[in-house]
Image (cartoon, coloured by chain):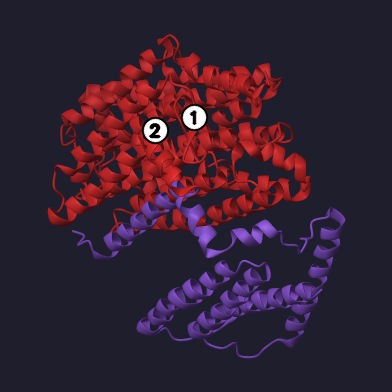
Amino acid sequence: MIQQVLFLFLAVVAIGSALGAVLARSPINSALWMVVNLIAVAGLYITLNALFIGVLQVLVYAGAIMVPILFVIMLLNLGSMPAPSEIQWKHVVAFILGVALLTQLAFVLAIGLDALPEMSVSEEAVAASSAREIGKMLFTRYVLPFEIIAILLLAATIGAVMFAKRKFA
Amino acid sequence: MDLSQAYDAMLGDLAGAFPLVLLAVAGLVIVVWDAFRNNDPLLPYIAGGALAIGLVFEGSQLASEQTTLFYGNIRAGGFAAFINMVLLGGTLLSVVLSVPYLRQIKHAYGEVYALMLFATVGMMALATGNSLIMLFVGLETMSVCLYILVGLVRKDEGSIESAFKYFVLGAFATGFFLYGIALLYGATGTVYLHEMQSGFAQSGATTMFWAGVGLLLVGFFFKVSAVPFHMWTPDAYQGAPTTLTGYMSTTSKAAAFTALILVLYYALPPERWTTVLAVVAVLTMVAGNVLALAQDNVKRMLAYSSIAHGGYILVGLAAGTAAGYSGALYYLLIYSIMNIGAFGVIALLEWDGKIGREQTMESLSGIGTQRPFLGLAMAVFMFSLIGFPPFGGFFGKVAVFGPAIDAGLTWLAVIGLLASVASAGYYLRVVYVFSFKSADERPAEAPATGTGFNVPFSSLAVLSLCVVLLVVVGFIPGLRDVTTHYFIDMAVAAGTL
């Protein structure tokens, strides 16, 4: 029960902050909403007992990736978009009602199709989510995809440098 | 899992994945070399050498038994050797064609060759991958390299447009693909293709499984530019450097189709999707051919034509039999040869300084009399693309339409034949304009008769090779059996035949 409540809470925060990131008028606000979103998703991972992935999510995304994004926004000196002159409350209420109705519809459909996720975590899954096990898997079973991802990142870096730095005649 | 044992096993597997490792290392060498000696003319030789060695290696593996390496992540030998040969050969031809072309458009950067090698690594991972993770990583590696190559001519607005469209739509398709993988993993509990069917039978999570299949198919349809996911194709092909268009239109399609075949063959239960594939095949053939008729730019026309050819291959897949899959593989080989050749000719005939984006077909009137070899080669490629006997394209079409008829999809094969007949309209127009129109009929802004159009020896050699291959490929005894053989053997091994 407590798990389901936690899941609902984190899911609502994640969706709400994602909406905030899209709808915010200023890029800084947008980026900060995204931090909230990433942390909520990290919380979801932790409720699934994937502690290591959750910590990585906070470290890598919320930490390492968001900081450059904020820097770029700062360096480019992006202004915020003009605020809408007046808010049409009728539309806002209609939107919220629509979302609520859609949620109900989706819920009924999901029950009908038996597609709701079960909140149970097996013992093996818990054991496999430790840093040690993930590291082992990464360097044995998944070593080939891992190495090819290295090539993918290298290619992306080369492309970025080439587009940015090559002197084009 | 004992780690020391694991490392021994992986070290042994390295030999089987030799071409993959070789291409990656050669790409790294090119990048580093390029950093010290900028745009060294030696760089394409490194790329070409690595590709040639890989090609010879895979040729030696062609008859060997199929195995999986690296904990079942990737296939080697047999079937994998065949498709790797197509990919390596196509890349090799494209590299040779690209050297003079990139010099001509003044973008002969060393990175291009490194990126082509990296893209080929991704394609090989995609085409021979045995787990969904491998497929995804390979697909992304291939796509990211292609996004960069498409936008190579950064100062040209058409090139930027095409790269941007390709990138944004491609990122969407990747999202679909990944979501599909996640749902399939959730429904079956495995990422390995050959374990998927039993996993599905055990879990019985039907809705999640079919939703995953649907999303995965959307991702695949995008990558092979099947209608209605083809919107990016004409723009991306038109704005990319021409020889690289030939490269991405053939090898990337071959890799994506092979992965699709493997997924259909191993991972999905054999019902339900025949209708989906048949409908998509019809849409793709009809839309591709009809839209190609209206094009006035040869590159754009070939882009629509490549969409249509994707439709023909889907006909073979819709048949859903071993013969259909092997026919599709055979078609991919022939399609690669003719399309690389056709784009190679167009690359040599560029004069507008905008990577051929804006020149009309009429501006090349009478080029066949001025450059008889190019006219002849183009005629062979066009007739082969129509599917005219004795050229390779004819045998390819037999190989995909025949199994469809055997599988009871006669209506589909008939639509395919009608579409091929309609395609003669635009292919023959190229032959007519190139060889039978007089050069005096060129529009005013076109280059005057007798000017330009250098044909370097290397391009000549590649185009001659493509022509010769297309003439003889249908008559090589046993080549068709090679592809059939893989699926029959696999079916025997799986006990389904």
Q: In this picture, is B46 found above or below A14?
A: above
What residue sits 51% from the left and 70% below the top?
A: A56
Kind of residue indicated by mark 2: Gly
Q: Which residue is mark 1?
A: B67
Report the disc number at residue B16. 2
Quarter of the rendering containing residue B399:
top right
> Which x, y percent locates residue B425?
48, 27
Which chain contains the residue that carries disc 1? B
Left or right, residue B281 beside residue A136: right
Which chain contains the residue that carries disc 2? B
**Contact flag, marks 2 and 1 (Cβ < 8 Å):** yes
Kind of residue indicated by mark 1: Thr
Q: Colour of chain B?
A: red
N-term-proximal mark, 2 vs 1: 2
Q: Provide the letter of the chain coloured purple.
A: A
Element carrying mark 2: helix
